[in-house]
Image (spheres, rainbow, N blue to C red):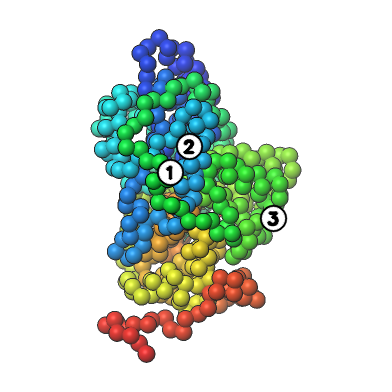
Amino acid sequence: MTPDNMTTASEHLISTGTQNAPQTGLYCFSHDLRVQDNPQLNELLCRCDRVMFIYLLNPKWFKTDHRGIRSIGEQRWRFLYESLQALDQCLRRYGHQLHLLVGNPLTLIPALCEQHHIQHVAGSYNSGLNEYRQWQQLTEQLDAEVSLAHQNTLWTSQQLPFRLHQLPKQFTPFRRQIEELTVQAPVSLSERLNLCQPAQSPDNTLTFEQLPKPCLCHADAPFTGGEDAGWQQLHQYLWKSRQIEHYKQTRNELDGWQNSSRLSPWLALGCLPPRQIWADIEQYEAELCANESTAWFKFELLWREFFYWSAHRLGSDLYQPGGERKKNLLTSFYAQRFRSWCEGSTPYPLVNACMKQLNATGFLSNRGRQLVASALVNELSVSWQHGAAYFESQLLDYDPGSNYGNWQYIAGVGADPRGGRHFNLLKQQQEYDPEGIFIRKWQGDASLQRDAVGIDDWPLI
Ligand SMILES: Cc1cc2nc3c(=O)[nH]c(=O)nc-3n(C[C@H](O)[C@H](O)[C@H](O)COP(=O)(O)OP(=O)(O)OC[C@H]3O[C@@H](n4cnc5c(N)ncnc54)[C@H](O)[C@@H]3O)c2cc1C
């Protein structure tokens, strides 16, 4: 449904809604933590007289797995916490609130629907397989009408020029077809948010004070969660600093807040809709400057789009060691090598500096991500999946499609027609950190040996 005919449908529902029995709706926020350009939210508001807003937290996020990795690391949790708080504050301005609940969506949502006589449930998909499967199950299970859409992308699935199973396997043919399409303008929040009443509050909600206390933001990476902060960053990067005009020249730098947009964390949590970014760039190009940097920036948003839809095409193959190529890779799990990679104590100073930056801030430049991924796979012979799991825990902008897709690409089991990437670390250091400024800043000193223990786990002297 396009935003245009959506408005028509919505108006129709408003005009007829009052004649029927009062309708109660449930909006389940996930990776769409915003009220602007949220057609699913608007549509629910138009159907309902009362509405409840929830966000579900999973207790597993705070537990560590067999590799000692916590599903959501400190900085990533902080950014999510702030984004939820910002959304709650926004809803409160309209007389509503965000209810935080802990538990399994497959039991919680049906129970809420029954207790609160909910007739309509809405939310959005993201690129994760588990979330997708949960929604499929809920759709079958619930008596309420369930409405879901992909709304963290530039195009909806209906607007794509191919069916998902026919999606091009490589980026270039995907891009050639998709860049012909127009990106629809973002839609504003429906005025119905003011008119709808809040539904009765659910039991067992948590307050923000009851959630794990978030850490402080690192001064070097001032990412603040929430919709307003995302808009500010967009405004700053485009209109205020005009850094976008130099994007092509600066995007590969290892450090420096202004060298790339830094918009990915807001995109990943849906605080900022990609259609808004696209609309702003087009306006910028029309009014101020269109050059190869503005074009390159749009090109990168298409990469995001590619990985998003590829995740849906691949299903569980996105997470398999052999990836979409179903390759048999000769890798293993060297616990000690993996640990030294995670903490930044490998024999490679550049890798160490990058990993320390990631651990401290929750962010790493695209170049940094490529280098550490290549080092884990090629220098340390550890399976890419462990690296992807560590990134999942640490990255503020963690997104299943972009993360696992890029890791597969580097490990040579994914969409790369060249079959993997092996970066020469010394050459990269000479090119991107010739004076060692980045390495010194993040104390990337090299450990002398790659292995501290032998195959039998005895210390090597
Ligand atoms: C191993 C590895 C793992 C990655 N994991 C993630 C992840 O979990 N989440 C994530 O958003 N990005 C991921 N990326 C892609 C990329 O590194 C980040 O999107 C980018 O560094 C974010 O910084 P930025 O917003 O300043 O990007 P910019 O350079 O300003 O680019 C603008 C936007 O384009 C998109 N984009 C840029 N490059 C890529 C790319 N290679 N793949 C997909 N989208 C891209 C992002 O949405 C980004 O915000 C990964 C890359 C690698 C090599």
Amino acid of disc 3: His
Of residue 377 and residue 87, the one placed in the foreground of this image is 87
Rounded to the nearest angstrom, the CA distance separating label 1 from label 2 is 10 Å
Q: Residue furthest front?
A: 209
Q: Decide which of tag 3 and tag 2 comes sooner along the chain.
A: 2
Say which element carries label 1: helix
Rounded to the nearest angstrom, the CA distance separating label 1 from label 3 is 40 Å
Residue 88, disc: 2
Q: Position of residue 311 (x, y in %)?
A: 40, 49
Q: Decide which of tag 1 and tag 2 comes sooner along the chain.
A: 2
Q: Residue at 71% of width from left, 50% of height from top?
A: 241
Q: Residue at 35% of width from left, 87% of height from top?
A: 460
Q: Are marks 3 and 2 in contact (CB under 8 Å)?
A: no
Q: Position of residue 278 (x, y in %)?
A: 59, 41
Identify the residue position indicated by label 3 in the image: 246
Compared to residue 112, the image places residue 133 above or below, namely below
Amino acid of disc 2: Asp
Identify the residue position indicated by label 1 in the image: 208
